[in-house]
Image (tube, rainbow, N blue to C red):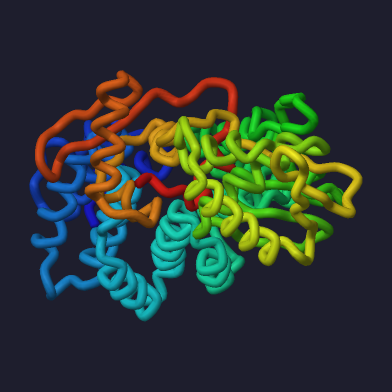
Amino acid sequence: MDALISAAGRSLATGDPLGALKLVALRNDPPALALRGIAMAQLGDFVKAKTLLRAAARGFGAKQPLPRARCVVAQAEVALASRDLAFPSKTLDAARALLETHRDTANAAHARYLEVRRLLLVGRLDDAERALSKIPSELPPSLRTAHELVIAGIAIRRIRTKEAHAALMRAERAAREAGIPALWAEVDSALRVLNTLAARRIAKGEDTPLKLEGVEALLKSRAFVVDACRLAVRRDGAVIDLSKRPVLFSLVRALAEAWPGDVSRDALVARVFRLKLADESHRARLRVEIGRLRRVLRSLGDITATKDGFALKSPAREVVVLALPVEEEYAPVLALLSDGEAWSSSALGTALGTSQRTVQRALDELALAGKVQSFGRGRARRWLTPPLPGFTTTLLLPAALSLD
């Protein structure tokens, strides 16, 4: 490796892409193309970065498998940064295996982190933890920072604030040791998540904002909690998942918001079935759904009939609704877009577990309302929105909310 390539590599390692480009901008050999691609990625030009990295991988060819594998890992990182979740995982796994075979521990660990970050992004927390456990503990400072950020990300999504804060403190120390400003900024951004609005507590007509620590305390309390962030009902550690039963969840939320009072039958029909006028057939359907809800909730509480409607009864002293910071029809889409990155509709569909056409309809309506904007055409079309001010989207992302 010549001196210019070595110097450019050191510049990139310390977060100085412009310094690297000054050294290799006019060169077109594979090592220079790879470094130029990484530099362009650090500067945010992901399209140019992808082109350069592909050219570098072709230039290395089958005769130089190790640098080619490193290019594949770099391409995977650019894909993740540009929210291209369709990057083939088998290709990344093969590159990682080759790096491990050649004892390139640092780059192999980096490839594993990319896998973990993708799993975290789409809400597969158990898979992310299993993949994270396979990464060796002896790592350079930059990768230790990434390691702790992933641990913190999982802890935040699981609402474990003490664990998240400890991991972020370790990440901050590792980032300072690495001396890379971009890593400091990433850690600072994660720390702000713990100190911003994460959800709302609705009880007896009062709507109170909560930070993540407050959410954790509520979930650990003995209250009957209707969790509108995860579409579940919780009490004393027991959890009933209603994410696939939206009608039942709408019913229990309406009853919880009215507790200790009741909700009239007509009001429930209007809210749950979205009908202005109710006839006997709708009331009959309501009775059927209330019966189903009783069976589902029998271990946590009960639904009783009143003169005008129905009321929620629970052994818990308090019934609380844990709501999203911002509630609207397409909140899950806005939650993902609010990270400030540009997403494709296919990537949004993958992260939300729904079809690309469903996401596209949501994006079209949000665009008409002026809440999102797009650039590019066809497969290159990307969507973004400014970050929503004043709260974290941590609790928005895992919610399996239907967009239909």
Query: In which image quadrant can residue 44 be found?
Result: top left
Find residue 57 and report its horizontal and vertical position in percent.
15, 60
**Residue visible at 34% across and 54% down in the picture:** 354
Expressed as whole percent of the image width and height from the top left, the position of residue 383 reads 27, 34
- Foreground of the two, 179 or 314: 314
Question: Which quadrant would the N terminus be assigned to in this image?
Answer: bottom left
Residue that sits furthest to the front in the current view: 280
Depth check, front residue: 281 or 182? 281
Q: Image height check: is 46 above or below 125?
A: above
Q: Residue at x 49, y 62 (%)?
A: 124
Task: Specify whether 139 is left or right of 87.
Answer: right
Decide which of 349, 7 is in the foreground and name it.
Answer: 349
* Residue closer to the observer: 188 or 253: 253
**197 versus 379 height, above or below:** above
Relative to 110, is 178 on the left or the right?
Answer: right
| Residue 176 percent location from the top left of the image | 60, 38
Name the residue: 13% across, 47% down.
51
The answer to whether any part of residue 118 appears in the image is yes
